[in-house]
Image (cartoon, rainbow, N blue to C red):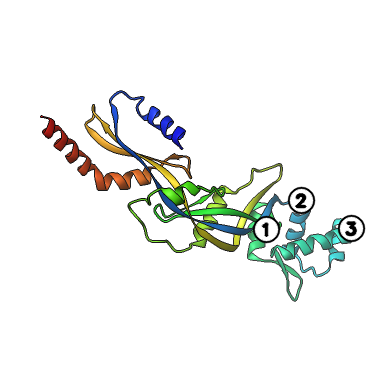
Amino acid sequence: MDQLIKELRSSLLATPDISIIKDQVWKLPIVSYDVSFNRVKRLKMDILMKMLLFAFQESDIRRAAALADMLLVEELFIRDLIDKMQRGQLIQLEKKGFKLTAKGYNYLEKGIFDEDMEGDQTLISYSAIHDDYLLTAETAHPEAEEKLPLYRYDAAKGSLKKDRMQQLLAKEMVYPEEESFQIIVTDITACIEHKTHWIPCIEFQLYDQKQDVFYARVWNTLKESWDETLAKQIEEREVVKWRKAMEQRESALG
């Protein structure tokens, strides 16, 4: 931590007109969740599946054998495709034969097909201060829990919002497209909350002499970046006090 503070100070003071009024380290509460979710493999629909869907759309067909004779394809292969399309809810069996569902029409138009995969899991962290969910690795900071003061502007604990977790997963865990398929997250199946853990943050209170401006910079060790949200919260509450304190010091010296 000391080395990180030293490096951050050096980067801030690289601008000649900037001076550091104060620096301090405090802890931020973070809640982590073990999140399990379903995935599908999204494939480009092959020509045979398209032909079957078109056939079900145009004709009354109940038997795989009829399609096998029509398309000159092994009946077992046709049965496997029909089973796959039923599981994917692209078709359903009605009185006159197999018919496309609304999903079937939609996927046929787009030329895609979703194949179920085994579920997966990941760790998601939530910061009430930011009201934000992040994909993170479990990082322990025992020194933060034991020694550091709590961030002075607390926030009420937010309620769990699975829809926002799913949006995060859908955005961040889209696997790179490979050849003719892509693996995507569909829905959350389980969410287990861990106890609150603590993330150190490094705060710098700064003065730009050239611009005559006070401002804050806060390094968030969870994000490993400068945190604009925390800096803005501090500035809105404290910049006026920093200026008054400087004016009082100058008055006392003068």
Query: What is the crowding at mark 1: few (fewer than 14 residues within 10 Å), some, or many (at least 20)?
Result: some
The one nearer the camera, 134 or 198, is 198
Q: Secondary structure at mark 3?
A: loop
Residue 61, position in %: x, y?
79, 68
N-term mark: 1 or 3 = 3
In the image, farthest residue toward the front = 147
Real-space CA distance between mark 1 and mark 3, rounded to the nearest whole angstrom: 32 Å
Residue type beneath disc 3: Glu
- What residue is shown at x 58% (from left), y 58% (from top)? 34
Q: Which mark is residue 47?
A: 2
Which residue is rendered at x = 60% and y = 60% of the image?
187
Question: In the image, what residue type sits under mark 1?
Answer: Gly
Give the mark nearest the N terminus, 1 or 2: 2
Q: Disc 2 residue type?
A: Ile
10 Å neighbourhood of mark 3: few (<14), some, or many (≥20)? few
Residue topped by disc 1: 119
| Residue 77 pos. (x, y %) | 85, 58
Q: Which residue is mark 3?
A: 74
Residue 25 image point, x, y percent: 38, 43
Question: Where, quadrant-wise, is the C terminus in this rendering?
Answer: top left
